[in-house]
């Protein structure tokens, strides 16, 4: 198994997770692979890109980053600049991440209680930055079953000295609804994909969390780069039954859905590299700043 196949397998098996981490790792692996093999045909690069893209069905940041890389190589007519092009792509993603963290940290105030879900390197980056700035707040989060990604978030935040409380996923709505007992001020979510006019995709459990927050009139903020925007149909990933119950009764059916869709009516704003964005602004921002994602007329698509 070569390094590209191994990376694709690690992404599929969730050994590498988080949209930004997946995109950055894939770019770095392509750079390393090219340096070692020095292939001279663009179609070979295209084949390796497709292997990485097939690892997960809900990773527009990965798709857009790799498609842009391929288009740049074709435009510059050659692979001899591949290392430089990948380096530029990596630096752009890192700068985008930094901008989102800086924009998100402004929303956190002293004394706040924040509820989050799953593991998002962007969300944890915002919370860690707020802590380093001396802000005092606490975080609630669910386990994120069946693979318990909430534990990754909990470990990272606890390590930074942030007060963290974990609950089972099914208790999230209860916690949010009990404002007299635990006043939640904000719900912070990451996202895997952004639909320009409909909503965002995030880990399963996000819909009920956002719905509960909306009912309780608690702001819901989603953190994510507009490089995660997609226009095609997103296939909701269904994962292995064994993740839920390894030795289930033979005639028991289990559906292990990996992602949720959160409509914009539940979302207060999207924390992006361009600041806090309202859903109606996404189309124009993407058309202006990332025209390679899709061909779009921002005037006819506004609103």
Image (cartoon, grey):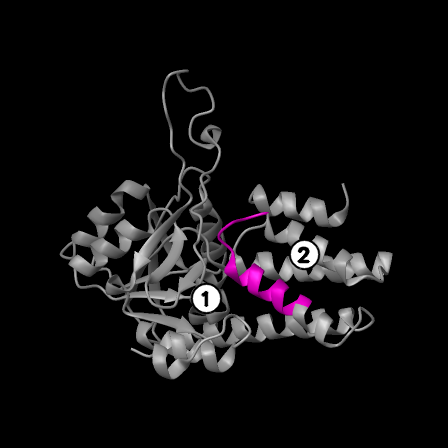
Quadrant position of residue 114: bottom left
Quick one: label 1, few (<14), some, or many (20+) residues within 10 Å? many
State the mark number for residue 71: none
**Residue visible at 31% across and 57% down in the picture:** 262
Q: In terms of depth relative to the viewer, which is nearer, 168 or 258? A: 258
Q: Does 240 sit above or below residue 112? A: above
Q: Farthest residue in the left direction?
A: 180
Determine the secondary structure under disc 2: helix
Residue at position x 68%, y 75% in the image: 88
The quarter of the picture where the N terminus appears is: top right
Q: Which residue is mark 2?
A: 49
x then y, percent, for residue 268 = 27, 69
Dominant secondary structure of the residues highlighted in magenta in the image: helix
Element type at marker 1? loop
Q: Is residue 139 above or below residue 105?
A: above
Side of 296 relative to 208 (left or right): right
Q: Quadrant of residue 300?
A: bottom left
Q: Is residue 276 magenta?
A: no
Estimate the spatial distance between the alpha carbons at disc 1 and disc 2, rounded to whole Å.
19 Å
Quarter occupied by the C terminus: bottom left
- What residue sits 46% from the left and 53% below the top? 119
Question: Quick check: marks 1 and 2 in contact, CB under 8 Å?
Answer: no
> Could one spot residue 28 in this view of the protein?
yes
**Residue 229: mark:** 1
Comes first in the chain, label 1 or label 2: 2
Which residue is located at x 44 percent, y 60 percent? 193
Magenta segment boundaries in residue numbering: 55-70
């Amino acid at each position: 198994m070569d390094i590209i196949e191994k990376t694709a397998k690690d992404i599929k098996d969730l050994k590498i997770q988080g949209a930004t981490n997946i995109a950055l790792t894939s770019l770095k692996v392509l750079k390393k692979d090219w340096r070692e093999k020095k292939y001279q045909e663009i179609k070979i690069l295209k084949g390796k890109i497709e292997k990485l893209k097939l690892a997960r069905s809900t990773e527009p940041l990965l798709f857009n980053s790799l498609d842009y890389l391929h288009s740049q190589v074709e435009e510059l007519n050659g692979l001899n600049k591949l290392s430089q092009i990948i380096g530029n792509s990596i630096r752009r993603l890192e700068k985008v991440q930094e901008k989102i963290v800086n924009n998100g940290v402004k929303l956190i105030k002293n004394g706040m209680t924040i509820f989050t879900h799953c593991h998002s390197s962007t969300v944890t980056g915002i919370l860690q930055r707020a802590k380093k700035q001396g802000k005092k707040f606490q975080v609630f989060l669910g386990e994120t079953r069946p693979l318990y990604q909430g534990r990754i978030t909990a470990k990272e935040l606890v390590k930074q000295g942030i007060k963290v409380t974990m609950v089972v996923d099914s208790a999230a709505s209860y916690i949010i609804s009990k404002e007299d007992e635990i006043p939640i001020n904000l719900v912070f979510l990451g996202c895997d994909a952004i639909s320009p006019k409909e909503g965002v995709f995030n880990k399963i459990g996000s819909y009920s969390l956002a719905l509960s927050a909306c009912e309780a009139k608690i702001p819901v903020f989603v953190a994510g780069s507009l490089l995660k925007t997609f226009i095609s149909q997103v296939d909701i990933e269904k994962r292995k039954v064994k993740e839920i119950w390894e030795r289930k009764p033979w005639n028991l059916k289990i559906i292990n859905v990996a992602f949720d869709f959160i409509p914009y009516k539940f979302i207060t704003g999207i924390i992006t590299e361009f600041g806090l964005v309202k859903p109606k602004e996404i189309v124009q921002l993407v058309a202006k700043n990332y025209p390679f994602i899709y061909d779009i007329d921002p005037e006819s698509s506004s609103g």
